[in-house]
Image (cartoon, grey):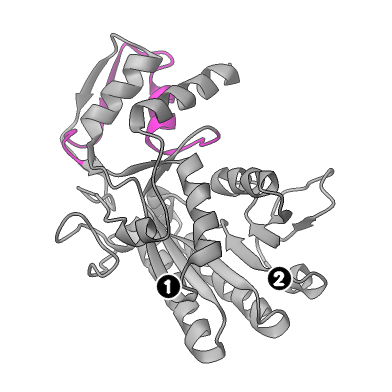
Amino acid sequence: MKILIIGNKGFIGSHAQSYFERQGFEVFGCDVVTDYVSQHYFQIDASNSDFRDVFAHTEYDACINCSGAASVPASLQDPLRDYMLNTVNVFNILDSIRRLQLGCKFLNLSSAAVYGNPKYLPIDEEHPLNPISPYGLHKLQAEQICAEFSSTWQIKTCNVRIFSAYGPGLFKQLFWDLSRKAQFATKIELFGTGDETRDFIYIDDIVEALYLIIESGDFRAGIYNLASGNEIRIADAVQVFYSLYKPKLNVSFAGVNRSGDPLNWCASIAKMVNLGFSPKIDIETGLICYVRWLRDLK
């Protein structure tokens, strides 16, 4: 099987490449940075991405789109950049598939941000969509583009709504920010109250789920939640992290939430379970691995 990973230099993309290579697949990469080593790599222009050459000479069984921006605060500061990376690029990729490789499966990494603040928990795939940030809206628009190409040109598309991903190699989001704040401080203050909740999923579970979707998922504009199915308070996640990384740190919460951040998340993963998915890494085990990686950076 030949798999193309767009955004293979990023957090999920790099782990996905390693995973699929271990499975014995022929993996091709595509990103905006230079790669002097790989024979199966395409570099594209971040400001004017054109994917036609990527699809012109090799027939892929599947394309996984791991590219795009992944920051709610950044989407508020520069919504046009977020729109180009998360929405326009999806259109450009699919248009190249339409023109050159109608048989290629397209798996798009979306986000739980499309749900906004949930009306009920756990959130299933039928939950109303009400994004509260440009990032969430642009991810939703990308899903709609996938549906357009599926219904109009019968392109095989699927979207996976990833909740709170973490693991070695992630240089942003909650646990990375906690590590930076703790470097030179004995006291830190965080946004929110600590009672906000998230559904954390470790990177190894994510890439295994991507494999299951490619093998057995619904590529008629299908939608899958990708999470652990466990709701964890931010205060509890912070406590576990600092117990491993810097015990005795004094942590407080400001009581003010950031714009664009939902209050509570917990996913129903029943659809993924039906594909054979079973998350293996709990939050403590995952954070032990993440802290080990952080220490290796020093």
Circle 1: residue type: Gly
Q: Is residue 233 above or below residue 104?
A: above
Classify residue 65 as left or right of residue 74.
Answer: right
Question: Magenta residues?
Answer: 169-196
Which comes sooner in the sequence, label 1 or label 2?
A: 2
Q: What residue is disc 2 on?
A: 50
Q: Residue at x 45, y 80 (%)?
A: 147
- In terms of image quadrants, where is residue 140? bottom left
Q: What residue is disc 1 on?
A: 222
Q: Is residue 153 above or below residue 172?
A: below
Q: Residue at x 26, y 70 (%)?
A: 126
> How many angstroms separate mark 1 from mark 2 (CA)?
26 Å
Circle 2: residue type: Asp
Q: Residue at x 55, y 86 (%)?
A: 154
Classify residue 246 as left or right of residue 38.
Answer: left
Task: List x then y, in percent, for residue 227.
Answer: 36, 49
For residue 36, the mark is none
SS state under label 1:
strand
SS state under label 2:
loop
Visible in this render: residue 134? no
